[in-house]
Image: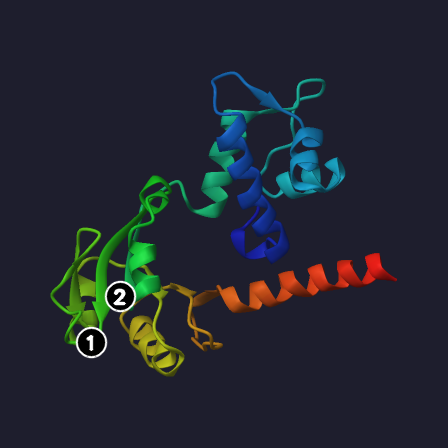
Amino acid sequence: MSSKSSIPAPTVKRLSLYLRELEARFSEDGQTVSSQQLGRALGITDAQVRKDLAFVGQTGHPGIGYKANELAHGLRQILGTDRAWRVAVVGAGKLGRALMGYGRFGDKGFDVAAVFDADPKVVGTTVAGHRVRPLQDLESLVAERGIQVGIVATPADAAQQVTDRLVRSGVRGILNFAPIRLNADGCSIVDVDLTLSLEQLVCQVSLGLNRDSA
């Protein structure tokens, strides 16, 4: 099995998609899956699938393919979802509330251990079973509850300051929903920009419409 740091980012994304496909369609004991089946599901070649899975230490069995449960286990190990992760959500507005209520976090081993907000009207309320704490409690609760991952769902003007505090508190990874690029030394950041994704989508739609009308 390769070191996680040596796996290219596009491959990591595809590994997550392979795992999703396995969990959805090949979860029964004894089932096998071929690189062709996985490639067809993702719209890529079976050669690319085999190359990606080699990072997980999976080479398949001639004439059989991959044992689905073994492959899923290996993917969870390399992706880090074979263990529990404690998560802090910063920002209990509409987006933060939606994220807290997302049931699949728990299914994937992500435990929302603390929720923070700067609005006095929101602090002290309960959202999806979590009591919203004031920002001044952030450092102490991150340490006390062993939180490793932060979700930033704040307005753009507060996101970098919140990120700095999370990193100083020991958080090692941040999922950023704020519409701003964050900087954090020694911390992994993944940006989720819904507006950017919509712009890219409508661009593709527009290009398709232009081709159709040409």
- Pick out the residue farthest to the bottom: 157
Amino acid beneath label 2 = Ala
Q: Residue at x 21, y 70 (%)?
A: 138
Q: Residues within 10 Å of mark 1 (few under 14, many from 20)?
A: some
Residue at 35 percent across and 47 percent down: it is: 105
Q: Residue at x 53, y 31 (%)?
A: 22
Mark 1 and mark 2: Cα distance apart in space:
9 Å
Residue at label 1? 119
- Residue denoted by label 2: 92
Judge by depth and name the residue closer to the eye, 116 or 199.
Answer: 199
Which quadrant of the figure has residue 48?
Answer: top right
Rendered position, 100 above or below 154: above
| Colour scheme employed for the rendering of this structure | rainbow
Q: Is residue 193 visible?
A: no
Residue 37's x, y, as percent?
A: 67, 29
Taking the image as shown, residue 72 lies to the left or right of residue 14, namely left
- Residue 87 image position (x, y, % from top left): 30, 57
Assign the C terminus to one quadrant of the image: bottom right
